[in-house]
Amino acid sequence: MDSILVTGGKPLRGEIAIAGAKNAALTLMPATLLSDEPLTLTNTPRLSDIKTMTALLQSLGAEVSALADGKVMAMSSHGLNSTRADYEIVRKMRASNLVLGPLLAREGHAIVSLPGGCAIGARPMDIHIAAFEAMGATIDLKDGYLHATTQGGLKGGVVKLRFASVGATENVLMAATLAKGTTIIENAAREPEIVDLATCLRAMGAQIEGDGTSRIEIQGVDRLHGATHPVVTDRIELGTYMLAPVIAGGEVECLGGKLSLVESFVEKLTEAGITVEETDRGLKVRCDGGRPKAVNVTTEPFPGFPTDLQAQMMAMLCFADGTSVLEEKIFENRFMHAPELIRMGAKIDVHGGTATVHGVDKMKGAPVMATDLRASVSLILAGLAAEGETQVNRVYHLDRGYEHVEEKLGAVGAQIERIKGQ
Ligand code: UD1
């Protein structure tokens, strides 16, 4: 398994191009199942999760080709010949459950493996199940698989989510485009990736209003057609690289970044004394060498502070002047990076969903273990400022969500390299 070796202490200067959003691409790709005609995505990130979704769609009979060095995905579900999402693929990536809605909408039935728990929490599917039941589906659990059937297809109705789940909102949004009648999603998630999905579905002929608010209304249509759609900028990759110069010192412009994607995050950076400037090319972050101020952060659904930036924010707060309190409200077990940061000299107390971070002015490099995607990159960020070498092991998690991290950080002056595993 590969590892990443970072030698700390190099200030960063330059530009980093932010890729298309992993989490948007992972819901846009299954949207191809809704139509017989081709769907082409541009600005797709080159990540192992995209390869997993490609394999899943191909296992259902879809054609998927990566073009332009993986930045364009050309897909067609003309030859769809299966409605079964197998455990062997679903267990690798929870987002595989996003084929359930499109398959149910198009074929009236689907068999999708339950994803199982993952490192950051149990991550059940009850919200998805209740939503499809409200649209007339019957769902049984057999041998670890959800067997979903309908009598003559899905029907519109009022779908009230007990929590604004991103995946459930996406699944229902896709399914409702082909359901009979009008579907209203109440307490819908408002993430930019949902707006991006709705924009793509509209380009395919869907009738959707209210995306980006907590009430989405979808008028079902008989069929969707082909489209070409650019994937929205990855706000999590954006926030991650915005933190790099805060931790290492220097100035970095994140190309393609927009304030509207990361407002609550930028509010916290501003509170910590960091200057963020929106330019016509992206977001520029400058740190003149002083320590950031401690700030308290609570993760919440969008537009609140994203849970997917919590680990990276903790890496920054390890170096802050003062004590910060981080509250994780989305996932029950998302502080596994804390013990690794402690191995590098951080002072962190974790009690349940709350981490108290006492800022230190110095950390020391150490061999550390990546436990999940965002945890991996938080260790790399900490390594940028730690004294000596930090070796982040098990970086296969990282490759699920960050394309060429060593090249992007290396290009702005970080001393970072990938060590190939066996
Ligand atoms: C998506 C993102 C993930 C992000 C998360 C929260 C993708 C591919 N992944 O994941 O990166 O961290 O949103 O912003 O877009 N829950 C239930 N029952 C359900 C569904 C969810 O209890 O049926 C719980 C989850 O266990 C979790 C919380 O709700 O505690 C949020 O989950 P959800 O918003 O569904 O996240 P995902 O769509 O899985």
Image (cartoon, rainbow, N blue to C red):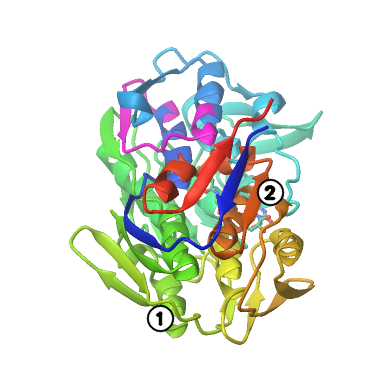
Please tell me whether mark 1 sits on a helix, a strand or a loop: helix
Q: Residue at horizontal 46%, vertical 81%?
A: 290
Q: Residues within 10 Å of mark 2 (few under 14, many from 20)?
A: many
Q: Which residue is mark 2?
A: 370
Residue 142 location in percent, x, y?
79, 30
Q: Position of residue 236 (x, y in %)?
A: 46, 56
The three-letter code of the residue at mark 1 reads Thr
**Could you give the CA–CA distance between mark 1 and mark 2, rounded to whole angstroms?**
29 Å
Spot occupied by residue 43 in the image (x, y as percentages of width and height):
32, 38
Residue 60 spot, x, y in % from top left? 54, 19
Indicate whether 28 appears above or below 337: above
Is residue 54 located in the magenta-colored stretch of the structure? no
Q: Residue at x 65, y 27 (%)?
A: 89
The residue pinned by badge 1 equals 270
Q: Amino acid at mark 2?
A: Ala
Q: Which residues are magenta?
A: 33-51
Q: Quadrant of the N terminus?
A: top right
Quarter location, residue 93: top right
Say the numbered circle drawn on residue 380. none
Q: Which residue is more in the foreground, 192 or 8?
A: 8
Quadrant of the image occupied by residue 348: bottom right
- Quarter of the image with the C terminus is top right
89 versus 180 height, above or below: above
The residue carrying mark 2 has its beta carbon less than 8 Å from ligand 1: no
**Vertical comparison of 94 with 239: above or below:** above
Q: Report if the beta carbon of the residue with label 1 is closer than 8 angstroms to ligand 1.
A: no
Which comes before the other along the chain, label 1 or label 2? 1
> Which residue in the rendered view is the most extreme toward the left?
280
| 310 displayed left or right of 411 | right
Q: Is residue 108 visible?
A: no
Q: Residue at x 63, y 34 (%)?
A: 2
